[in-house]
Amino acid sequence: MNAAEPMSHMAQAPSSTRRWPAAGYTSAPYWVFTDPEIYAREQARIFRGPAWHYLGLEAEVPDPGCYKTTYIGESSVLLTRANDGSLHAMLNRCAHRGNMICREPFGTANKLYCVYHAWSYTLEGDLSRVAFQRGLHGEGGLPRDFDPAHHGLRKLRVDTLCGLVFATFSDEVEPLEQWLGEIAHGIRRVLRRPLKVLGYDTQRIHANWKAYHENPRDSYHANILHTFYGTFGLSRQSQESAMVLDGSGRHVYFYTKAGTEKNGDDYKETASALRSHNDSLRLEDPGILKWHDEFGDGISVQILTAYPTFVLHQIANNLATRQLLPKGPGQADLVWTYFGFADDDEEMTRVRLAQTNLAGSAGMISVEDAAVCEMMRRAMGDGQEGESFIEMGGRDLESGGTTKLSERAIRNFWHNYRVDMEL
C-alpha cells in the first residue's frame, strides 16, 4: 500500500458492488463523482463512445497546414486543415510507439512529424515516411511486407455546424446536426456569420467534470447564486425566459430577456430573501451593462450545453465556447474561447472584450460556478455516503416543461449518463 495514497480512495468499495439509488435519475450518488473506476469507464463509454465532442472553431485553423491540439476526455487529439481545405481529426499519438506528435496548442506544418523516430504523416493522418524503413547495409529495417497504409494515425469522424468543429470515435453515431436535435436552433441563432477569435482563458477546476457539466444545464441556480445577474437585472427569474431540450434530453439551452419583469407577490417574497438581489451594490462603471440586441429577439442571456462537455454562451454581447476537459476524478480544465464576428467593427469588438469580464475564470458571474463545484467536492468527501436530490420542477424527464425554475435538464443528463454507463 502506498502511504501517500489518499484514504478516500483506499476506502472505496469496488465499482462492481455499487448500486444506483432507487430514486433513479432524480438522485445522483456522490460516489459517481469520486470513484476512479467510474472515471475510467467514462473514458471508454462516453468519451471514446457514440458521442460528438467539441474540438474548436473552424476559425482556429483558418488555412491549409494549420493545426490545433486539444483533448477528448484523456485522449490527445489533433485538428488539422489539409492542403485542399478539408478538416481532419486524429489522435495526437504516433502509430509507432505512442509518442505525442504536436506539443504546441496551435501551429502550422506541411507534415506531422514524430521527433522520437521520425515517422511522418500527412495532414490527413496518413503515414508518408518512416526513417530507415529499409535498414542500412542490408541490416535492420522493417519487414518487407510492412504497409504504410495500415499504420496511419487513428482517425476520427469530423463534422461541423456554423463554424463549430466536433469529432467522434464512433462510426455509428448519427451526423452532428441530427445528434444535436432541437438545440441546433440555439446554435444557429447565435452563430450567424463567420467568426473571429478574440482570446482564451483556461482554468483548472478542482472538482469532477460532471459537477461542472451539471452547472450550465442548471437554469434554476443562475438567479440565486449569481449576485451580478439578480442585482443588475441582466437575468432574473421574473423575466421572460424558457428552457429547450432536444428530444433525447442530452442537450439543452435556456434564455432570458432582460427588462421583461413580471414581479408578482410570489417572486417578491422569494427575491427579498435572496443574497443575489442586493440593491446596495453599485457599479463604478455601469457601461458593462449596456448591450446591443444584435439578434433582434430581446434575449440578453442564452446558455447552451451539449452533452457531454460543450457550452456555447451569449451573455449580453459576449460570445464564447467552453470546452470541459476531464483531468482525473477530482479535477477538470475549462477552456474558454471568446469570439466575435469577422465583420464586427471596432466598437462592437470593444464591447465584447469589456463584457468578457462577466465570464471566464475571474468573471463577475462565472467565478461563482467553479467555486461552487470545488465546494461540492470538499463537501462530498470520499463520496461513500450521500446522494443529491433532483426534484425541482418534478420527478420525471418531462416534468418542469420549459420553465427555467426546474431541474429537468439535470434529470435528463443523469438518465443519459446511466444509459451510456450501464449503471
Image: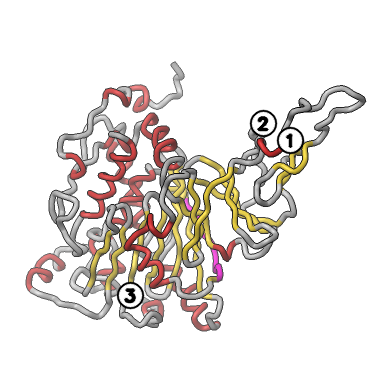
Instruction: State the residue in front, 307 or 344.
Output: 307
- 201 is within the stretch colored magenta: yes
Closer to the eye: label 3 or 2 = 2
* x then y, percent, for residue 188: 41, 70
Question: In the displayed structure, does residue 66 sit left or right of residue 203?
Answer: right
- Sooner in the amino-acid sequence: mark 1 or mark 3: 1
Residues under labels 3 and 2: Cα distance? 50 Å
Q: Secondary structure at mark 1?
A: loop
- 61 is within the stretch colored magenta: no
Name the residue type under label 2: Arg
The C terminus - image quarter: top left
What residue is shown with label 1?
116
Q: State the image quarter where residue 253 is shown.
A: bottom left
Are circles 3 and 2 on residues that touch, CB within 8 Å? no
Q: State the image quarter where residue 393 is shown.
A: bottom left
Name the residue type under label 1: Tyr
Q: Which mark is residue 97?
A: 2
* x then y, percent, for residue 300: 33, 75
Are circles 1 and 2 on residues that touch, CB within 8 Å? yes
- The main secondary structure of the magenta stretch is strand
